[in-house]
Image: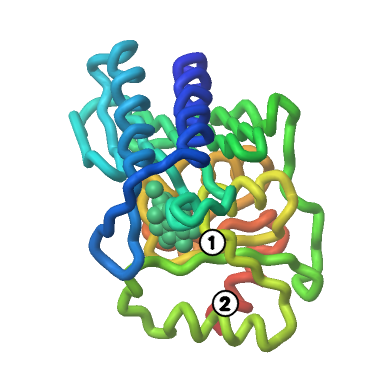
Amino acid sequence: MKEVLLSTIKAAGALVKEGFSQEFEISHKDGINNLVTTIDKASEELIVHTIKAHFPDHGFVGEEFGNENEDAEYKWIIDPIDGTVNFAHRVPLCCVSIALARNEEVIMGAVYNPMMNELFFAEKGKGAFLNDQPISVSAKSTIQNAFLVTGFPYHFPETKVHPVDIFAKIVKQGFPVRRLGSAALDLCWVACGRFDAFWEFNLQAWDIAAGYLLVEEAGGKVTNFSNQPYTIWDKESLATNKVLHEDMLQLLFS
Ligand code: IPD
Ligand code: CA
Ligand code: CA
């Protein structure tokens, strides 16, 4: 399964990289500026087709073509391009994200940014890697110096405090906060210590599942906003280097 995961994500990444400098069609999904391109669809088709050829009994949760064989023991959770709005505007901050869950538990995850040639991989209990080199979360222990990243959904959920108000509150306190436009990369960049924490409201399983395992296997922590361990059906996500987890919950919600 690891071999299939890695060869498939490399092939999908090559397709995305090639598509980046070619003509493609863009269409709108529901929400505001929620885009999809012909390359997103081609990438998901390639991934599902390749994995199905190896594992015909497995299930799929894919962003563009939906779910298949959902009750299967093994499920592949696929974001064919995470960072589609970047991609559609030729901004090279995007990736392919594929996770493998067994009975709803993520056991493997890979995230590949073909533009930077960065392939992140993690396997449950076996560590996290960037281009085959072990990675770990940052060692930062003071929230005042934290370097943060977040994202905004296409649909704003009904929350007690609006995500933009939380963002404004934190920026006004002087924290450096970035918004890259790819939740999967945000999580991987926490995993390799570039960022100290990431949070976002209203994500989908395909945005988080692989990046979640990267962060945890790199020594970090991922929970929902109630500090409960991540499950693949959680929509909200807080990922940190673990040391700053409680401080981040305080910063966001107090
Ligand atoms: C989006 C990106 C973005 C995040 C959005 C996601 P997409 O995924 O991860 O960073 O803020 O919430 O939906 O549409 O590029 O696959
Ligand atoms: Ca996504
Ligand atoms: Ca996507």
Is 81 placed left or right of 6 in the picture?
A: left
Q: Can you say whether 57 is above or below 128 in the image? A: above
Local crowd size for mark 1, using a 10 Å CA cut-off: few (<14), some (14–19), many (≥20): many
Q: Can you identify the residue that label 2 sits on?
A: 252
Specify the amino acid type for callout 1: Leu
Dot 2 or dot 1: first in sequence order is 1
- In front of the other: 170 or 27: 27
Question: Pointers 2 and 1 in contact (CB under 8 A)?
Answer: yes
Which of the 4 quarters of the picture holds residue 236? bottom left
Quarter of the figure that contains the C terminus: bottom right
Residue lying at 44% horizontally and 57% vertically, measured from the top left: 85
Quarter of the figure that contains the N terminus: top left
How many labels, in total? 2
Residue 9 appears in the rendering: yes
| Residue 182 image position (x, y, % from top left) | 52, 54
Alpha carbon distance from label 2 to label 1 = 10 Å
Residue 231 appears in the rendering: no
Residue lying at 80% horizontally and 59% vertically, measured from the top left: 140
Q: Can you identify the residue that label 1 sits on?
A: 238
- In front of the other: 227 or 217: 217
Residue lying at 46% horizontally and 47% vertically, measured from the top left: 82
